[in-house]
Image (cartoon, rainbow, N blue to C red):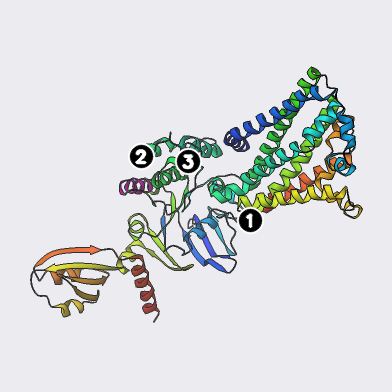
């Protein structure tokens, strides 16, 4: 049953997954490749000459003169979350709300398959493809860093992989929850993206305003710090627990809601 | 001991907010029976079928299929049931073969009738679903519903879009299912279809089950129009006097006799004249409902 859902889901998404994988790998290779042009320049000084507020917004603690700092600032801090958030929200919304909207969920649920199995299988497929995309991003770093003379910690890469997986899976999981509630894919995307934009805005504003900073814990981005993991391989267990909790609670809520709702276009 | 019916609805009710889907539906469908659920669009047929399939939760009442609750034991029920949607929605990007494989995968490849159905319905399995006509999509839905030889078929307007030849093939397949002791719950707004294939009919209108009749009772009670051309003058008053005749109208060159029930006395009366032509026309569904509605009111009165 699950194998059938996984197999079909993978076949249906093979083209889009290939596009995401190639795009992420290509961008990763590009950033690795241009490091050799930047490593002996005064980029660190340039970075430090920027206004503090700007550096705060993009990661004040990052040492741009190192390979992992450069890779974090150029890719992991902005572009990577953007691409994988779009992937996560799109995947989740298509998996549930999209099928309800198209009417194919009726055909699927006319078969002897439990609703919770459908949600679980779709979430499992999402998690596996997310892991694959994280690997696609980081393998060029493993291979390319020594070639371009960059220093990279394999432990740091492993720690980053864990944190990134939990962070993006948290976004995907709450998107699954909204996709379980709504019968319109665009509405599910709209609400999920709205929550993400709010979280991002809160993260940025928290860095400039002490009052707003009291609410920083409400933003998922508060728990995303790729440089810390990549550079120091230092685990913030509390942060990881929050992300894991978000995944568990959101997924459980998605299953419970989807089991109880009417499936009708 | 009497057999438990395969389908039981008890005061089954569904409201979508303030909008009524179906209300206080009480009916049973026995094993080996083809039950027609006849009603116009918006009568509550699809809502009922969705509740039987466990897709929507009843607002009140309950439904049982093979003795199991349709909401709480939906997965187990679907091991015994094949179903089609009224508005067939398929996976557009798949080829028909892929779609059938996918659905087959939920029953570990138990589609024992798949090859036979594909052949009899002349279905092109190599085509992409999005390239299929309305009729061919319907054929795919029929194969999906029937290929695992289910104990019960729940079919929502199954012949929509099928050409007349394919309709005949479908009726033949349905007949074979019945011969093998299967139960069929079929919704339709086509009176002739229900008359042809069903054993009993539930007549539903505006969310209420108005009546359940055997096909024989349906035939006896339904209004029909007999259009007869004569070569000479006819005494209309004698025709009007017959108890089966509800109305006689002169239309151009023929008489339209509206009748209900046994036609024997009418045939004998018109045989007294020189008949040039005689045809029966099927009443519209609205005529049919009106006849039942008024008939019911008369009986009550």
Q: Secondary structure at mark 1?
A: loop
Q: Residue at x 61, y 45 (%)?
A: A94
Q: CA distance from mark 1 to mark 2?
A: 38 Å
Chain of the residue displaying label 2 = B
Q: Which mark is residue B148?
A: 3
Q: Main secondary structure of the magenta part?
A: helix
Q: Residue at x 85, y 30 (%)?
A: A69
Q: Residue at x 51, y 38 (%)?
A: B104
State the extent of the magenta-drawn residues as a range.
Answer: B164-175
Task: Decide: is A201 above or below B244.
Answer: above
The residue that mark 1 highlights is: A261
Residue A233 seen in render: no
Q: CA distance from mark 1 to mark 3?
A: 28 Å
Q: Is residue B172 magenta?
A: yes
Crowd around label 1: few <14 · some 14–19 · many ≥20 (10 Å): some
Q: Secondary structure at mark 2?
A: helix
Chain of the residue displaying label 1 = A
Marks 1 and 3 belong to one chain: no
Q: Is residue B149 left or right of residue A250?
A: left
Percent x, y for residue B155?
45, 52
Q: Is residue A147 left or right of residue A254?
A: right
Lower sequence index among marks 2 and 3: 2
The residue that mark 2 highlights is: B120
Marks 1 and 2 belong to one chain: no
Task: Decide: is B71 above or below B291.
Answer: above
Of the residues tagged 2 and 3, which is closer to the observer?
2
Percent x, y for residue B214?
37, 63
Chain of the residue displaying label 3 = B
Q: Residue at x 44, y 43 (%)?
A: B140
Percent x, y for residue B133?
40, 44
């Amino acid at each position: 049953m699950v194998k059938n859902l996984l197999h079909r889901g993978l076949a249906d998404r093979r083209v889009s997954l290939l596009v995401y994988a190639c795009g992420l790998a290509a961008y990763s290779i590009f950033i690795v490749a241009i490091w050799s042009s930047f490593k002996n320049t005064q980029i660190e000084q340039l970075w430090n000459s920027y206004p503090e507020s700007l550096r705060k917004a993009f990661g004040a603690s990052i040492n741009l003169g190192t390979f992992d700092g450069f890779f974090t600032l150029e890719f992991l801090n902005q572009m990577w979350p953007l691409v994988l958030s779009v992937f996560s929200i799109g995947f989740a919304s298509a998996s549930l709300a999209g099928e309800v909207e198209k009417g194919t969920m009726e055909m699927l649920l006319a078969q002897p398959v439990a609703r919770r199995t459908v949600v679980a299988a779709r979430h499992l497929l999402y998690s596996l493809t997310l892991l694959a995309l994280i690997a696609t991003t980081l393998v060029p770093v493993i291979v390319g860093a020594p070639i371009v003379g960059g220093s990279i910690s394999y432990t740091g890469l492993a720690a980053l992989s864990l944190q990134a997986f939990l962070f993006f899976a948290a976004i995907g999981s709450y998107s699954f929850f909204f996709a379980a509630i709504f019968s319109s894919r665009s509405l599910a995307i709209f609400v999920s993206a709205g929550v993400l934009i709010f979280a991002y805005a809160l993260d940025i504003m928290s860095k400039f305003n002490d009052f707003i900073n009291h609410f920083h814990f409400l933003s998922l981005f508060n728990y995303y710090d790729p440089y810390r993991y990549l550079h120091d391989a230092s685990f913030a267990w509390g942060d990881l627990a929050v992300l894991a909790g978000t995944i568990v609670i959101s997924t459980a809520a998605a299953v419970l809601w989807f089991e109880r709702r009417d499936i009708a276009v | 001991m009497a057999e438990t019916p395969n389908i039981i609805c008890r005061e089954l009710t569904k409201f979508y907010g303030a909008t009524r889907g179906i209300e206080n539906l009480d009916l049973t469908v026995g094993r080996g029976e083809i039950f027609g659920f006849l009603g116009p669009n918006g009568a509550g047929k699809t809502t009922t079928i969705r509740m039987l399939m466990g897709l929507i939760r009843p607002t009140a009442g309950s439904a049982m299929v093979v003795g199991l609750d349709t909401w709480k034991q939906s997965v187990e029920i679907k091991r015994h049931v094949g179903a089609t949607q009224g508005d067939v929605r398929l996976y557009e990007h798949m080829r028909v073969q892929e779609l059938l494989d996918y659905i087959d995968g939920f029953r570990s490849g138990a589609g024992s009738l798949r090859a036979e159905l594909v052949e009899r319905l002349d279905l092109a399995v190599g085509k992409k679903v999005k390239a299929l006509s309305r009729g061919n999509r319907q054929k795919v839905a029929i194969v999906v519903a029937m290929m695992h030889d289910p104990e019960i078929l729940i079919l929502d307007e199954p012949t929509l879009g099928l050409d007349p030849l394919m309709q005949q093939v479908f009726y033949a397949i349905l007949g074979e299912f019945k011969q093998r002791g299967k139960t069929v719950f079929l919704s339709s707004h086509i009176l002739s279809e229900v008359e042809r294939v069903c054993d009993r009919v539930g007549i539903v209108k505006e969310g209420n089950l108005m009546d359940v009749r055997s096909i024989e009772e349906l035939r006896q009670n339904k209004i029909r129009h007999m259009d007869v051309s004569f070569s000479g003058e006819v005494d209309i008053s004698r025709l009007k006097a017959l108890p089966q005749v509800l109305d006689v109208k002169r239309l151009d060159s023929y008489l339209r006799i509206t009748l209900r029930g046994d036609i024997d006395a009418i045939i004998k009366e018109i045989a007294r004249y020189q008949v040039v032509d005689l045809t029966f026309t099927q009443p519209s569904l609205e005529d049919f409902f009106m006849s039942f509605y008024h008939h019911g009111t008369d009986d009550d009165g």
